[in-house]
Image (tube, helix red, strand yellow):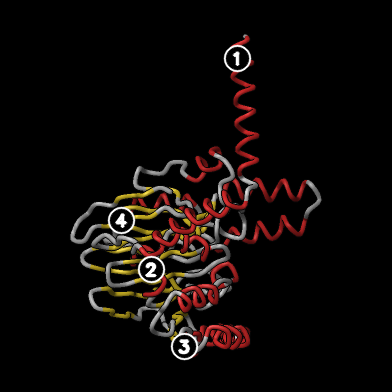
Amino acid sequence: MKKILLLIMVLAVLALAARFLSTVPAIQDRVVARGTATLAQQAATPLPIPEGLNVYVCGSASPLGMGQAQACIAVVTPEHFYLIDSGAGSTENLGRLRLPMARLDGLLLTHFHSDHISEIYEVNLGSWVGGREQPITVLGPQGVGKIVDGINATYNLDRIYRVGHHGADLLAPELGVLQHQSLAAGETIADGELKITAYAAEHPPIEPALGYRIDYRGRSVVVSGDGNVNAVTRQIVDGADLLLHDALSLPFVTTLSKSLADAGQTRQAQIVTDVIDYHASTESLVALANETNVGMVAFYHLVPVPPNAIVADMFLRGAPDKVTLTEDLMWFELPADSKDIVIHKP
């Protein structure tokens, strides 16, 4: 017993000494110098991008859920870098993943709900400051020009301030202005060995809404945005290696709506109920996985983000092994000319 008490006293003294030393300016300066040197070295070291198609989850949440960033998927190859949507909180995850913002090729929007577009300018600013050499083009369904023009107008003074502060040699003004291009369902974009195909998503009353299939060196990924599973979905995922699809847990959302109504929160109950009809249920996605030859189905834009393991299990009820739940910062490695899919957890 005496030895334990002595050990506790020694640890307490050491803790007090450490606390005291941390208040000494010379010690603080040394710690900060070492920390910033490490961060600077990490920033100067390019992120290794494996050969093939690499898919990063920058945001896995829907508005119905907390603790994760909203919708954002990054598709990266050694020569390409595209983002699909840019929801709240996702730009921070781009930094945490150390993705190569200075070579961002474009931003694909699925539709214009706020949780898919709220950080477009943050992406623009981060890549501009990071040294991007071309303006970003925001691609999306009809109406994308209205979104981009509004963002450019809203942040006009921000761009003027930053150029005035840092100088046009460092921040070329024209690179801070977003460009836009409308896409229609069925339209394709070729970028070297990478092909982007837009398809119609069923997300009423949003019309048009798009999803995207990206093919590169024998590998393919489909990213849904928001929408129900229908014949178009089944066609676009045919032969795809990986499908990232918005997913709603009908048992959980139904129970949540009833609980809200029982508690007298009728407005909230109605909103939660309304969400059901324009997001894919996990049951429909499990059927899709079982009935098509898609290699892997990953649920993202989760409605809601599972707050615990019980709700996570509800999402995967009856699902085959090729179905998985995403979380922020996980990524999928699809080596070129292969069938392998390597999942990297954060």
Of 142 and 109, which appears nearest the observer? 109
Number of other residues with Cα within 10 Å of mark 1, as a class: few under 14, some 14 to 19, many 20 or more: few
For mark 1, give the secondary structure: helix
Q: Identify the amino acid type marked 4.
A: Glu
Give x and y (percent) for residue 329: 45, 54
Which residue does the numbered mark 3 point to in the structure image?
A: 172
- From where the camera sits, is residue 135 visible? yes
Task: Please name the residue that numbered disc 1 is placed on.
Answer: 4
- Alpha carbon distance from label 4 to label 3: 35 Å
Tags 2 and 4 touching, CB below 8 Å: no
Dot 3 crowding, Cα within 10 Å, few <14, some 14–19, many 20+: many
Image: 115 above or below 281 = below
Check whether the beta carbons of the residues at disc 4 and disc 3 lie within 8 A of each other: no
User: Which residue is located at x 51 percent, y 63 percent?
Assistant: 71
Does residue 231 appear in this view?
no
Label 2 crowd bin: few (<14), some (14–19), many (20+), radius 10 Å: some
Residue behind mark 4? 333
Task: Name the residue that disc number 2 marks.
Answer: 100
Q: CA distance from mark 3 to mark 1?
A: 64 Å
Q: Nearer the viewer, mark 2 or mark 4?
A: 2
Badge nearest the viewer, 3 or 1: 1
Question: Of the residues shown, which amino acid type is indicated by label 2?
Answer: Pro
- Indicate the secondary structure of the residue bearing disc 4: strand
In-front residue for pair 5/306: 5
The mark nearer the N terminus, 4 or 1, is 1
Counting other residues with Cα less than 10 Å from the Cα at mark 4, is it few (<14), some (14-19), or many (20 or more)? Answer: many
Instruction: Tell me the CA gap for discs 2 and 4.
Output: 16 Å
